[in-house]
Structures are given as structure tokens and as C-alpha cells.
Image: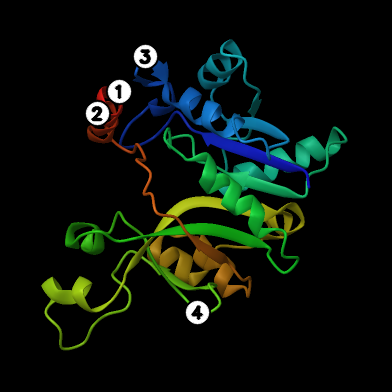
Amino acid sequence: MKVLAIIPARYASTRFPGKPLALLGGKPVVRWVWERVSSVEEMTDVVVATDDERIAGAVEAFGGRAMMTGSQHRSGTDRCGEVVERLREEGKEYDVAINVQGDEPFVMPEQLRCLVGCFADEDTCIATLKTAVRNSDELFSSNNVKVVCDLRGRALYFSRQPLPHLRGVEQGKWLEKVRYYKHVGIYAFRTSTLRELVRLPQSPLELSESLEQLRWLENGYEIRVEETAAANIGIDTPEDMAEAERYLKERSNN
């Protein structure tokens, strides 16, 4: 199986402009992601997809491959679709593409191996990850996307609100009654499926929650969801960067 890992990296982040190039432990964030992903032997190729020449230059400077993509893309998935098509024009075909966000410096190799393994099942077209919600702050934060699955481990719905709603139970006791899960935003696709997804128009549920995976569900695609024990530290704000620095220091002291 040929697997392409794509790392979308935008410079123009609203909450943290230039975050792929922000230094974490002396290295740009995007380099942390690239090194983590490149360490996974199942990856045939790794490409950073960006619309900014500063990011492309930094990636090439540390020995990675960067591909300049259009600035019109609404999501990282659309950017991944462009990369797959352009590499196809170069004669490079892949069975699976994995979208690893460029602001996930601590993405774990075992998470990526888990996603690749999902495609041993021929029925898997899209795969992603979930992890258990640990506290009420996580549960009720709209920044944490929650997911509910059927008994086969296929996603039923994603929401910024807690799912399920426990009628007649005080919110402070919800975690005592139900095991909640939040979505870990790494996606893997069969490349044939990815080509279909990027042609779909935005859907009503997607526009309501600002979650592109709802577009796929609304159009009848199954999303396989595997559980991971670890919740990655994503970097969306300067405050997240400070937390990541603290994590690095704690890890070096242990």
C-alpha cells in the first residue's frame, strides 16, 4: 500500500499568524510535524502543502518537500486534494492520503500507524481518531469537537456541543454517567474517495457547525473512528505554544 502524508500549513491564521514557523524548542512547528510523520515507516512520501513561500522555504531548508498550493482552499482537505492530483500528473499514484495538520507538533507515530492499518479493510474509505474526554472543561468547550459512533465504530455525528445530551441530569455529573469522546483531527482517505470529497458542495450541517466532516456524512460516506489514548497538543494560539513549551520541558526533565 502506498501512503502519502500531507501536512497542510497556512501562514495566515487568524488567531496565530505564522504559527507553522513559530519556534518550539528551537525548531519551527512545521518541522516537528514533518519529523514525526517522516519517522513512520508506512509513509511512502511526506509533503508539506502551503500557500506561503516563507513556509515552503523553511521546509526545503530542513530537507523536507514543500508544494505550493492555491490560496482559495476552504479546508486542509481541499489542499490535500490538490496535492494528490498534482502528484498524479507527475505519475505518482497513492492508495491512501493522510492529512496531518501543520500545527500538531506532537502527533504520535502510533496514531498514524493505526490510521494506515484501517485500510487493510477494503470497506474503509475514510478514517479518523477519537480520545476520551477527561473533564467538564473539555466537554463543554466549543473548541473541542465531540463525536458519537455506532456499534461498529462508524461516526454518527460530530458536534461542538456535548453528545449525547443527558436529559434530567445535572451537567456537572454527565461525565459520571456517559463516556464522552472528542475528535482528534487527523484524517486518512482512500485517494479515490478524496477526489470525490473535494468536489462536494458545502452542506447545511457543515455550515451550521463549521465542521467539514459533516459534509461527508450528509453525502452518505462512512467515517471509521478508532480510539487513541493520547490527546495531542495542537497549537491554535500563542497560549497553546506556551503550553507546548511547558510540555517539552517536563518531558526533558523526566
Q: Earlier in the sequence, mark 2 or mark 4?
A: 4
Disc 1 + disc 2, Cβ < 8 Å:
yes
What is the CA distance from the residue labelled 4 to the residue labelled 3?
43 Å
> Residue 86's x, y, as percent?
77, 36
Q: Residue at x 70, y 38 (%)?
A: 83
> Splitting the image into 4 quarters, where does residue 93 fall?
top right
Q: Nearer the viewer, mark 1 or mark 3?
A: 1
Q: Quick one: 210 or 151, which is closer to the camera? A: 151
Q: Label 2, on which residue?
A: 250
Q: Label 4, on which residue?
A: 150
Q: Is residue 75 visible?
A: no
Amino acid at dot 1: Ser
Amino acid at dot 2: Glu
Disc 4 + disc 3, Cβ < 8 Å:
no
Residue density around tag 4, few if under 14, some if 14–19, many if 20 or more, within 10 Å: few
Q: Quick one: 238 or 234, which is closer to the camera? A: 234
Q: Residue at x 71, y 49 (%)?
A: 96
Q: Quick one: 12 or 162, which is closer to the camera? A: 162
Q: Residue at x 52, y 31 (%)?
A: 36
> Residue 4's x, y, as percent?
70, 40
Q: Label 3, on which residue?
A: 26
Does residue 125 appear to the left or right of 247 in the view shown? Answer: right
- Secondary structure of residue under mark 4: loop
Q: Earlier in the sequence, mark 4 or mark 1?
A: 4
Disc 3 + disc 2, Cβ < 8 Å:
no
Residue density around tag 1, few if under 14, some if 14–19, many if 20 or more, within 10 Å: few
Does residue 38 appear to the left or right of 121 in the view shown? Answer: left
Q: Which residue occupies the extreme front position in the image? A: 254
Amino acid at dot 4: Asp
Q: Quick one: 197 or 137, which is closer to the camera? A: 137
Q: Label 1, on which residue?
A: 252
Q: Is residue 214 above or below residue 246?
A: below
